[in-house]
Amino acid sequence: DIQMTQSPSTLSASVGDRVTITCRASQSITGWLAWYQQKPGRAPRVLIYQASNLQSGVPSRFSGSGSGTEFTLTISSLQPDDFATYYCQHYRAFGQGTKVEI
Amino acid sequence: QLQLVESGGGVVQPGGSLRLSCAASGFTFSNSVMHWVRQAPGKGLEWVAFIRFDGSNKYYGDSVKGRFIISRDNSKNTLYLQMNSLRPDDTAVYYCAKDPTGVAPHWHFDPWGQGTLVTVSS
């Protein structure tokens, strides 16, 4: 089975920072890579699908890129509402999550 | 708008059974692949199962295979998860989620329900 590994596990940042989260697959994968945001006590929300497609309604400061085994989620200018945990997903495998904190 | 509402969670003893439901509205449920995903307290997300639009194919994660059964009633716009032989490590919030396709999943989920908590404990 393919394993998805995110880095870092925790990220400390400030409002206005550019933030990048990396997701590495244990072997080369197709572009079926999604990114989710989850806030405490809430269901996850999809941000990016098929590696780089922005889900409808998601702010344009979020972007996704990558291919092969390495993918990234970038937040161009961190906003107060963006402090949350982020997960990548390829097929049935989720990464372990990256917590973005102040 | 698209909405999913889970119900049926609760406290159950090890070895017991529970059936979760997920009521869908705001979209054509009968055209959609549907998934169950769970999250143990303080942990990450774990995919549990999916079912094709017509119920003809069902797939399960290794940790629940042989114990859980996913099903759907398209006439009631409702998804189900029958959980048998429950273990303490099945304790989690269980979410239902919609896939954008009906046959072969595209493996990104939107929307998700609010989740229902299942606690397996004696």
Image (spheres, coloured by chain):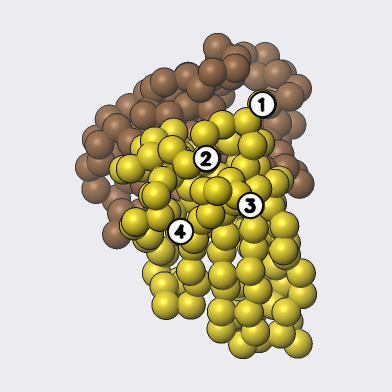
Quadrant housing residue A102:
top right
Q: Tell me which label, 2 or 1, sits earlier in the chain.
A: 1
What residue is shown at x 37% (from left), y 28% (from top)? A51
Quadrant housing residue B118:
bottom right
Residue B54 drawn at (x, y percent): 39, 49
Q: Tell me which label, 1 or 4, sits earlier in the chain.
A: 1
Q: Which mark is residue B49?
A: 4
The secondary structure type at the circle numbered 1 is loop
Q: What residue type is disc 3 on?
A: Cys
Q: Mark 2 — residue?
A: B29
Observer able to see residue B16: yes
Quadrant housing residue A45:
top right
Q: Mark 1 — residue?
A: B1
The CA span between labels 2 and 1 is 13 Å
Q: Tell me which label, 4 or 3, sits earlier in the chain.
A: 3
Q: Write down the colour of chain A.
A: brown
Q: What residue type is disc 2 on?
A: Phe
Residue B46 drawn at (x, y percent): 51, 57
The secondary structure type at the circle numbered 3 is strand
What residue is shown at x 66% (from left), y 26% (from top)? B1
Which subunit holds the residue at mark 4? B
Q: Tell me which label, 1 or 3, sits earlier in the chain.
A: 1
The CA span between labels 4 and 2 is 17 Å
What residue is shown at x 50% (from left), y 72% (from top)? B68
Question: Same chain for marks 2 and 3?
Answer: yes
Of B115 and A13, nearer the camera is B115
Q: What residue type is disc 4 on?
A: Ala
The secondary structure type at the circle numbered 2 is helix
